[in-house]
Image (spheres, rainbow, N blue to C red):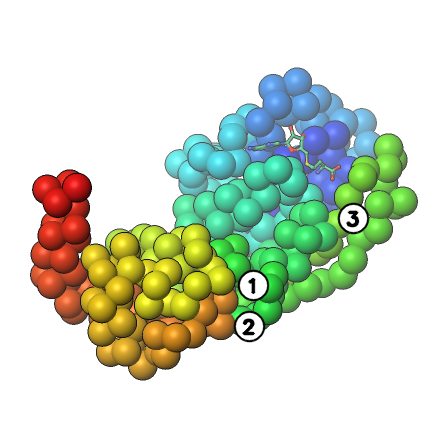
């Protein structure tokens, strides 16, 4: 069963229902959400049109409980994502719909590059690490702007992904790792011991935690894979009391 977010007029949806056993399409625009079942009924044989269920909801917030019970566990995500919110949509759907095993999404070409980048390059960043938490992702093709009408002013790219086991623990572990990733990339050109100084309470404390994780404190955040971030977050948790004390020491009372 497939989940589509942002079906719009249904250009992808009509093809999807022919391929998937059932499609639940989440559309935020009430007019488009109301029109899509009529479009499907007019364009598809009744047996196929019945496979489509349209839900008017915001893809940034939608949860399984918002879908009909028999469609609340989609296994595939297939979408031409709204480009302005593509990354939070994709990451949020992977978080809230653990049943999604694999997917294919279209996003702006530069975003596709970032989502699928490997450590070490300039395009590797927060979206790359966070998507790697949930899934193995790969570029699955370029979509040049002339294939659309009206022609957009950006190129597009496809990203294919397959869910992987989470590299650590539960939702709170993920939140801690994601906060660490945000801190490391907030000053991405700096060495980790400096970039993570305020996160850890001090550069010295950051260095101890990073070393304990088996990572070079002189490295930059853009060279680390998600597993390295998990190790650093774990060492910070182990050293938690000291980190908390250092944060207090450098906090408002000394300001
Ligand atoms: C670029 S998407 C793709 C449109 C269509 N799937 C296609 O391939 O032509 C635009 C659609 O996403 C919808 N959309 C935008 N933000 C949304 C959100 N947060 N949740 C659900 N749908 C959203 C818009 O209303 C619009 O229908």
Residue at image position (57%, 54%) is 76
Marks 1 and 2, how far apart at CA: 7 Å
> Residue 120 bears which disc, if any?
2
Q: Which residue lies furthest to the right in this view?
A: 146
Q: Can you give x and y, in whole percent of width and height, for residue 56 in the image?
A: 55, 26
Confirm or reject: label 1 Cβ below 8 Å from ligand 1.
Answer: no
> Residue 124 bears which disc, if any?
1
Relative height, residue 52 to residue 245 (above, below): above
Which residue is labeled 3 in the image? 155
Assess whether mark 1 and mark 3 are in contact (beta carbons under 8 angstroms). Answer: no
Q: In this view, does 212 lie to the left or right of 188?
A: left
Which image quarter is the C terminus in?
Answer: top left
Q: Single out the mark in the foreground, 3 or 2.
A: 2
Assess whether mark 2 and mark 1 are in contact (beta carbons under 8 angstroms). Answer: yes
Confirm or reject: label 2 Cβ below 8 Å from ligand 1.
Answer: no
Q: What element carries label 3?
A: loop
Res 122 seen here: yes
Q: Residue furthest bottom?
A: 214
Residue at image position (70%, 27%) is 36
Query: Which image quarter: residue 230?
Result: bottom left
Q: What element carries label 1?
A: loop
Q: Can you give x and y, in whole percent of width and height, for residue 247 in the image?
A: 17, 53
**Splitting the image into four quadrants, where does ligand 1 fall?**
top right
Marks 3 and 1, how far apart at CA: 19 Å
């Amino acid at each position: 069963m497939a989940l589509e977010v942002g079906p719009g007029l249904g250009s992808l949806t009509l093809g999807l229902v022919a391929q998937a056993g059932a499609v639940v399409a989440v559309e935020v625009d009430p007019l488009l959400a109301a029109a899509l079942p009529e479009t499907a009924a007019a364009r598809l044989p009744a047996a196929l049109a019945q496979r489509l269920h349209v839900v008017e909801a915001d893809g940034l917030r939608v949860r399984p409980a918002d879908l009909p019970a028999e469609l609340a566990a989609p296994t595939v995500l297939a979408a031409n994502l709204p480009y302005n919110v593509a990354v939070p949509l994709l990451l949020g759907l992977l978080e809230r719909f653990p049943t999604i095993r694999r997917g294919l999404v279209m996003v702006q070409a530069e975003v596709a590059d970032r989502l699928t980048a490997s450590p070490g390059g300039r395009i590797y960043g927060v979206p790359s690490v966070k998507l790697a938490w949930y899934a193995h992702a790969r570029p699955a093709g370029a979509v040049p702007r002339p294939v659309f009408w009206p022609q957009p002013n950006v190129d597009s790219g496809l990203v294919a992904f397959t869910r992987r086991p989470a590299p650590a623990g539960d939702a709170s572990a993920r939140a801690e790792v994601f906060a660490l990733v945000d801190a490391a990339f907030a000053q991405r050109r700096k060495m980790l011991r400096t970039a993570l100084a305020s996160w850890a309470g001090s550069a010295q404390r950051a260095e101890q935690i990073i070393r304990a994780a088996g990572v070079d404190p002189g490295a930059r955040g853009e060279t680390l894979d998600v597993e390295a971030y998990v190790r650093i977050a774990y060492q910070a948790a182990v050293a938690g009391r000291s980190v908390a004390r250092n944060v207090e020491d450098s906090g408002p009372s000394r300001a």
